[in-house]
Amino acid sequence: MSDFDVLAVRYTDPDAGARFAKSLRDTGFAILTDHPITSDEIEGMYETWSDFFAGEDRFDHAVKEGEQDGYFGFKSENAKDSKHKDLKEFYHVYETKPVPAKTEERTRAFQAKMIALGKELLDWLDENSPEDVKARISEPLTKMIEGSDHNLLRILHYPPLDEGVEPGEVRAAAHEDINLITLLVTGSEPGLQAKDSDGNWHDVPCGSGYITINAGDMLMKATGGYYPSTPHRVINPPKQENRSRYSMPLFVHPRPEVRLNADQTAGDYLDERLREIGLK
């Protein structure tokens, strides 16, 4: 990818932390291979949650007014400044909130391993960021998430597209993430693209077992722009590949009171963005 050189970082390599920080600095993205999340765990999660989205009882778990955990129906969310709702449905999983009983065992185990990996990746950034960037941050990144109950595992289902899709409607319109970093195990189908600094879109590699990590707005704000929050999107499939797509990003969030800069806390910014995308 000539203008968008996302590094594939082997988790077990001695220089993994430095390479991860470099890729996130250069592109806002990095790819992790040979990590602790097994293919069986990933496939088990897709199997469990595809069953959930196929059932009518998913509506019994609809998100309650004023809450953020639970099932969000088709076309619940729009990207910031987008005129159209995204063509997706999803379930929000938090550590302290209930999940459907049939998903509990696999989901909690997967969630715990992903959060532990997210903490380790933030530790890599704490170790490998320049001294002037470290001095700018209100506290080490790993400290920001200590005691946080805002880490969000989002289980996404993009259904096959029907004939009624309007011009401009896409599975996920171009957006930046809100949080510190996002960990995304490879989706069940391709479609994720990221935008380079020249405005060109690139397919993000989706090899089996990859975890794609991207910087969010909170990391960009906390580091004074050192790690860019890169726009990305999920495009609609060609007709011959028009089938369901599943995706499971973990959004790593600091405690609400953590200061991102002199003017804004993490909680303030989260509330602002949730209103912009129609979830609050």
Image: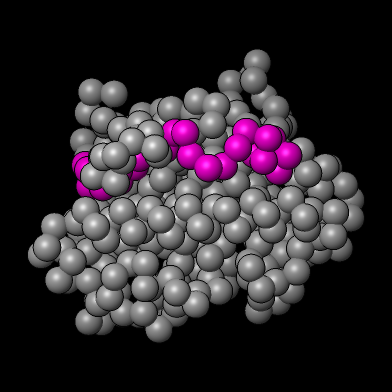
Figure check: 67 above or below 102: below
State the image coordinates of residue 143 (x, y, percent, origin top left).
36, 73
The mark tally for this picture is 0
Q: Quadrant of residue 209?
A: top right
The answer to whether any part of residue 54 appears in the image is yes
40 within the magenta span: yes
Figure check: 155 above or below 136: above
Figure check: 37 above or below 125: above
259 within the magenta span: no
State the image coordinates of residue 54 (x, y, percent, origin top left).
83, 42
Give, as a single range, the part of the protein colored magenta: 20-45
Residue toward you, 19 or 149: 19
Q: Dividing the image into 4 quarters, which one contains the N terminus?
A: top left
Residue toward you, 274 or 109: 109
Q: Dividing the image into 4 quarters, which one contains the C terminus?
A: bottom right
Q: Quadrant of residue 133?
A: bottom left
Residue toward you, 278 or 271: 271
Q: Residue at x 10, y 65 (%)?
A: 132
Q: Residue at x 41, y 45 (%)?
A: 213
The answer to whether any part of residue 80 appears in the image is no
State the image coordinates of residue 220 (x, y, percent, origin top left).
27, 60
Specify the farthest residue to the top: 240
